Image (cartoon, coloured by chain):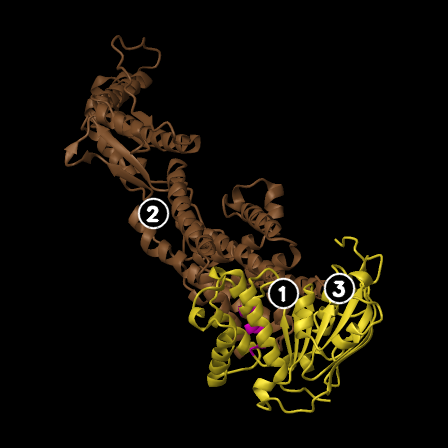
Chain colours: A yellow, B brown
Amino acid sequence: MGPVTPLAISGIGSAGAAGEEVLIVENLVKIYKGAARKALSGLNITVRRGEIFGLLGPNGAGKTTAIKIMSTLLSATAGRVQIYGTDALKHPGHIRSLLGLVPQNIALYGGLTARENLRYFGTIYGLRGQVLKERIAFCLDTVGLESRADQRVSTYSGGMKRRANLAAGILHNPRLLFLDEPTVGIDAQSRNMILEKLSLLKQNGAAIVYTTHYMDEAERLCDRVAIMDEGRIIAEGSLQEIADRPTGHADLGELFLTLTGKELRD
Amino acid sequence: MYKIGATLLKEILLLSRDRSGLLVLFLMPALLVLVMTLVQENVLKTMGEGHTRVLFVDEDGQEVGENIQRKLAGMSSIEFVKEIDGRKIDRKTALALVFKGDFQLCIVIPKGTTAACKAGAQQSVRRAFEGGAPPHKDPVERLDIRVYFDPTVFGGTRSAMLQSLELLAFGIEMEEKMRALSDLLQTYIPGSIRETMGSPLAESSGVDIPRMQRDFIHSRLLGVRESPAGKSVFEKKPTSVQHNVPAWALFGMFFIVVPMAGGLIRERHDETLARLRTMPISYFSIMTGKILGYLCVCLIQFGLMLFIGIHVLPLLGAPVLQMGADPFAVFVIALSAILAATGYGIMLGTLAGTYEQASMVGPISIVIAAAMGGIMVPVYAMPRIMRDISVCSPLAWGHDAFLNVFVRGGGLESVAWQVLALLSFFAASLLVSRICFSLRSRNGG
């Protein structure tokens, strides 16, 4: 299969079959050089179009490693990652324009304004001229930063930075968006806005892989979740399936603690 | 191309807003070139390498003073000062000015020097003719030309100046002795003939003793001439400006490694680089954009340094920067040096784990490379072992290339190996960076 164009460039909007498998991860293994144990130990995930897939797990469970491999940042020791039918580990260049990444850190240039950051990243995604202008305006409006777009990112509050970080990830309207704890350390208003916008992206047909430590976020946002520990998935399913487990847990948080234990993870 | 252009624009925007980066890139080398050139200009003067300002006090006002003045004034490296504000200087004022450091030395011809010199010459010639005659009952007292040095003047300058004056004094003395000899020959030779042949014979033979011409004293039979070791349009040594402008321009160029490496490390730590790596842009495009951004900034920085050398330093009493006859060669050297510096910046930014590491290793390594490369002290003034080591410094390659064009009058062909060395350093740095980047990416760094 040849390169697939992102929605913003192709103009195909939300076209495509609902339920289409966008991301297929099979038996993914990662062993870091010099590490005693596997960071990922046979991970299997399937994410469909228009679906938000939550990856939950304690610190060191392997969530960020999984996101890095799936988003072509890191090579795998073994296993397969298929994105829109393309082997992402063998041909990362073919599918990069389809991906969006919102890393855990604020991956923006603090010395540039939000608009300048978006203009730069948009150009890298191949957006030009009026299309680029419109996408920048749309994304800034989406994250509520239109009026502050010409201020340097370094002057923003934590919540504004997180929203700008999200804007840079959705600028090219990606078909598959990876979000690594995008709401860490922000106020309730900013978090609420981010979650609302992610729901809108999902409705527009994007597939989203979302890692978080906040169980309430996962319950509110995700269609399916996987609970990871020690590089493996220890529970997976829709929120209903998880809730129906015969363990008698009041909520996802309680189930999470039962599955992963109460001892501290550093 | 769009992606490279966007990266270039982003880098320029970021740099233009980084005040400390701008200080490092523009203010620091500009101040260094100003201060170091002026300091070195003064050191060169005290070492006798530059223009020496000499006060001349002629208390005698006769032939000896005129003779010395005429000969010293003919030397291009000496500025001869006899009057200040239209008034003749006396010995006391002159000594005060020298002590203050306004002049490197003062020459005083004491009153009666010419007369004493003439009388002494007559007396010594007479004594030579009279052989075993007893010493003159009233010997002429010798009057010395006095030289007063500024205490900071180096020993080499002192001995060179004293040597020159000794030679001048010797010449004047010889001239006076020959003149006395010529005069006294008229007296002594007829007398001697009369004594040998008898008085009547001597008078009848009409012996005519010819007067000696004194010009022969000045005609030189053996000379010493300084010649350039190679092809040169500049017969002079490099001026302090010719040494310092390229030296500190190179130093400034290489200091871009600090903001450049810092920027790369920040990109890595805040995951901007990770975001870029998930985008459809290659490592080559990211780095090319960065290199072009810093290349533009460094070319502006180099232009500023040349401007200081040509327009600012002369206002402060330093010579004008002479850049030789091949501006294209100058541009090629600057370009190669900037590329070498950017390569080093990328390598440092890739290898260093933290900003602290880069901000410590970067400046220290550049200062060491600059010291080794003859930026602070010329390579020829270093001990042999340091001269051998200096060939390893990229700053030495750049500086040597600039001096080849500025001072030795060379063109592009004369700087080919230095340019190649700088470009090879650039390529090697990028290769190391690429390998390190790939290894780190594979391991999730």
Location of residue B440 in the rendering, given as x and y in whole percent from the top left corner = 71, 62
The quadrant of the image that shows the N terminus of chain B is bottom right
Q: Label for residue B318?
A: 2
Q: Amino acid at mark 2?
A: Ala
Can residue B3 be seen in the rendering of this structure? no
Residue B209 shown left or right of residue A122 in the figure: left
Would you name the residue on which mark 3 appears?
A57
Q: State the extent of the magenta-drawn residues as a range.
A: A164-171
Q: Which mark is residue B202?
A: none
Please state which of residues B316 and A170 is positioned toward the viewer in this rendering. A170
User: In this image, B48 relative to A16: left or right?
Assistant: left
Q: Which residue is mark 1?
A: B427
Using the image, determine if residue B229 lies above or below residue A30: above
Tell me the mark number nearer the camera, choosing from 1 and 2: 1
Residue A218, image x, y percentages? 69, 70
**Which amino acid is tagged 1?**
Ala
Residue B79 against residue B141 in the figure, above or below:
below
Contact? badges 3 and 1 (CB < 8 Å): no
Q: Residue at x 43, y 57 (%)?
A: B406
Residue A262 image offset from top left, x and y in percent: 79, 55
- Determine the residue located farthest toward the left in the rendered image: B86
What secondary structure is found at the residue carrying circle 1? Answer: helix
